[in-house]
Image (cartoon, rainbow, N blue to C red):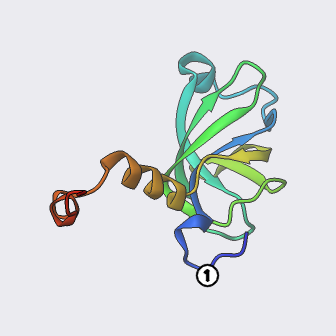
């Protein structure tokens, strides 16, 4: 996909899935096991700022990662690395992403349908 600009909404996503996570402590954090969800931070590029997220643990050991705000240029094959404070919890290879901000905006526009002003402008068929 070639976007018209580097800040195009098609480049931003707030949901991704990893493969089975390699946990530093060998097991997922206790809170994630207990609640199946956990707030933490994530990064997918070296030296990028940590981004708040929520992990949802799947039965196969993979996780869904829901970001607090969409991030640019998340790509399958990169590694998502998870942190709690300064502690690295583990990482997983990004397998797939949720819909882009652009796709979500397009869907929202379709669901809303035409605006009243647009309907009023349409002339009746004769």
120 relative to 63 in the view: left or right: left
Q: Image quarter for residue 72?
A: bottom right
Residue 122 drawn above or below residue 113: below
- Disc 1 marks which residue? 4
Image x and y of residue 45, in percent? 73, 65
Image x and y of residue 84, in percent? 59, 45
Image x and y of residue 101, in percent? 51, 59
2 relative to 116 in the view: left or right: right
Residue 6 drawn above or below residue 96: below
Q: Image quarter for residue 64?
A: top right
Residue 29 drawn above or below residue 11: above
Residue at figure coordinates x 65%, y 28% from the top left: 29
Q: Neighbour class for label 1 at 10 Å: few (<14), some, many (≥20)? A: few
Residue at figure coordinates x 78%, y 22% from the top left: 60
Q: Farthest residue toward the bottom? A: 5
Residue at figure coordinates x 68%, y 24% from the top left: 58
Name the foreground residue: 94 vs 37. 94
Element under disc 1: loop
Name the foreground residue: 71 vs 36. 71
Residue 44 drawn above or below residue 92: below
Residue at figure coordinates x 74%, y 45% from the top left: 96
Quadrant of image for the C terminus: bottom left
Count of labels in the image? 1
Image x and y of residue 105, in percent? 44, 57
Quadrant of image for the N terminus: bottom right
């Amino acid at each position: 996909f070639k976007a018209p600009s580097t800040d195009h909404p098609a480049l931003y996503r707030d949901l991704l899935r990893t493969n089975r996570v390699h946990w530093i402590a060998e097991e997922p954090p206790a809170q994630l096991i207990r609640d199946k969800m956990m707030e933490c931070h994530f990064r997918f590029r070296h030296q990028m700022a940590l981004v708040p997220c929520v992990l949802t643990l799947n039965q196969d050991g993979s996780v869904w990662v829901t970001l607090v705000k969409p991030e640019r240029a998340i790509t399958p094959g990169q590694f998502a690395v998870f942190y709690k404070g300064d502690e690295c919890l583990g990482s997983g290879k990004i397998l797939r992403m949720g819909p882009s901000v652009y796709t979500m905006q397009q869907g929202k526009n379709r669901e809303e349908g035409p605006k009243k002003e647009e309907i009023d402008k349409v002339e009746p068929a004769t």
